[in-house]
Structures are given as structure tokens and as C-alpha cells.
Amino acid sequence: MPGNPLTDPNWAPELADTVERLVGQVRDKATSRAVLVVRAVVFGVIIAFTLIAAVVLVIILGTKLLQRILTIGGGIDADSSVWISYMVLSGIFTLAGVFCMYKRESRDSLEAST
């Protein structure tokens, strides 16, 4: 009787192969998804910190460049070019903030009407 495990000589190796295959499939599915999620989190954090540092450096570069342009090209003294550059960049950031708040309010009103 081939269906009887006591008389079937291939029963133990087949059972071991089946268990090994199933455990391998479960391990592959669980670990591959976990590794994917962990990599996404780690790379996301690295990219976020890099972008924050890059934005800060670009703002500093813009301020210094504007001060240099005002000093050399505009004929303004160095002390005045500092506060003028601060006022220009703060005006740009204020306008960007107002624009973002306007877009947020219009989006919120659209969501409330639906």
C-alpha cells in the first residue's frame, strides 16, 4: 500500500522536502517584505535629511549671492546689502507661504463641499 506511511519508503524524504519547501516559501515572503520596508524607511530618512541640508545650504548660498550682487553690481555698501538681502528673501518666502495657504484653503473648501 503506497498510501500507508509505514510501508512507503519515500514517505519521510517527501515529507521533509514538503516541510522544507513550505518553510522556505514563508520565510522568503516574510523576510523579503520586511527587508523592503526597512530599506524604504532607511533610504527615506537619509533622503529627507539630505534634502533638508540641501535646502538650508541653498538658502544660505542665495543670501550670500544676493549680498554679493548688491555690493558689487548695485553699488550698495556691505552692511546695507545684508539687510536688503534678508528683506528680499523674506518677501519671497512670505509670498510662497501665502500661496501655499491659499492653495490649502481652496483644497479644504473643495473637500468640505463634497
Image: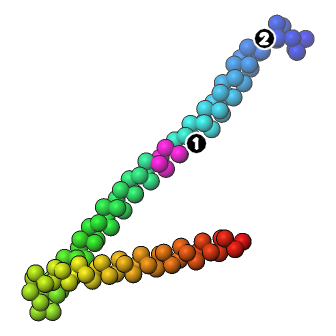
Say left or right for 11 vs 104: right
Q: Residues within 10 Å of mark 1 (few under 14, many from 20)?
A: few
Which percent across, then down, holds residue 8? 82, 11
Question: In terms of depth relative to the viewer, which is nearer, 40 or 83?
Answer: 83
Marking on residue 89: none
Q: How many labels, in total?
A: 2
Q: Magenta segment range?
A: 37-41
- Sequence-first disc among 1 and 2: 2
The residue where tag 1 is placed is 33
- Dominant secondary structure of the magenta stretch? helix
The residue where tag 2 is placed is 9
Q: Residue at x 46, y 79 (%)?
A: 99
Helix, strand or loop status at disc 1: helix
Q: Residues within 10 Å of mark 2 (few under 14, many from 20)?
A: few
Query: Hey, what amino acid is under mark 1?
Result: Arg
Question: In terms of depth relative to the viewer, which is nearer, 63 or 82?
Answer: 82
Say left or right for 85 vs 109: left
Above or below, comparing residue 76 to residue 37 in the picture: below
Would residue 67 be seen by someone viewing this image from the given angle? no
Query: Hey, what amino acid is under mark 2?
Result: Pro
